[in-house]
Amino acid sequence: MIVLRDGHGILPSGTRFADQAAMSHRSVETIIGKLATDEGFRRRFLEDAGAVLDELRGQGWELSPVETGALAALDQMAIAAFAEVIDRRLQKIELGAHPNQGGD
């Protein structure tokens, strides 16, 4: 059950309000995961977080204005540092971002 902030009652967790909140939070979790593991997504986000978040919302991702603002305000150095410590086997690399250094 969810207690409404305005104090006007309680909604069971199966209501549309609760479902939207859960979907929105799943979007936040997915975005944070992509920032940690998807090199191309992370690069684009660090270049222009607002544009990436607008793009995701345009694709139907559920994000409240508060969540959008909080994601856009994430510390860029912290995002990069966290991604750096994630095991490379869990990383999605961006093809073309790492040219062949052997000169082949």
Image (cartoon, helix red, strand yellow):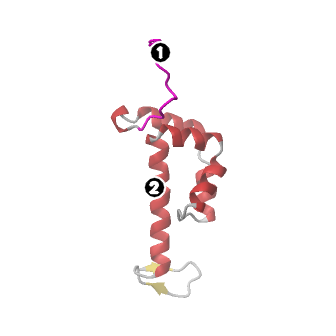
Percent x, y for residue 6? 59, 81
Residues under numbered marks 1 and 2 in contact, where contact means CB atoms less than 8 Å apart: no
Quadrant of the rendering where the N terminus is positioned? bottom left
Mark 1 is on which residue type?
Gln
Q: Is residue 64 left or right of residue 34?
A: right
Q: Residue at horizontal 58%, vertical 52%? A: 71
Q: Which residues are magenta?
A: 92-104
* Residue 41 in view: yes
How many dots with numbers?
Answer: 2
Q: Nearer the viewer, residue 82 or 39?
A: 39
Q: Main structural element of the magenta stretch: helix, strand or loop?
A: loop
Badge 1 element: loop
- The mark found on residue 101 in the picture is 1
Look at mark 2 in the image and give the residue it sits on: 29
Q: Nearer the viewer, residue 8 or 99?
A: 99
Task: Specify the amino acid type for callout 2.
Answer: Glu
Q: Is residue 75 visible?
A: no
Which quadrant of the rendered structure holds the C terminus? top left
Mark 2 Cα-neighbour bin, 10 Å: few <14, some 14–19, many ≥20:
few
Q: Residue furthest top?
A: 103
Asked if the magenta segment contains residue 94, the reply would be yes
Measuring from the top left, give residue 42's x and y in whole percent.
53, 41
Distance from Cα at disc 1 to Cα at disc 2 = 35 Å
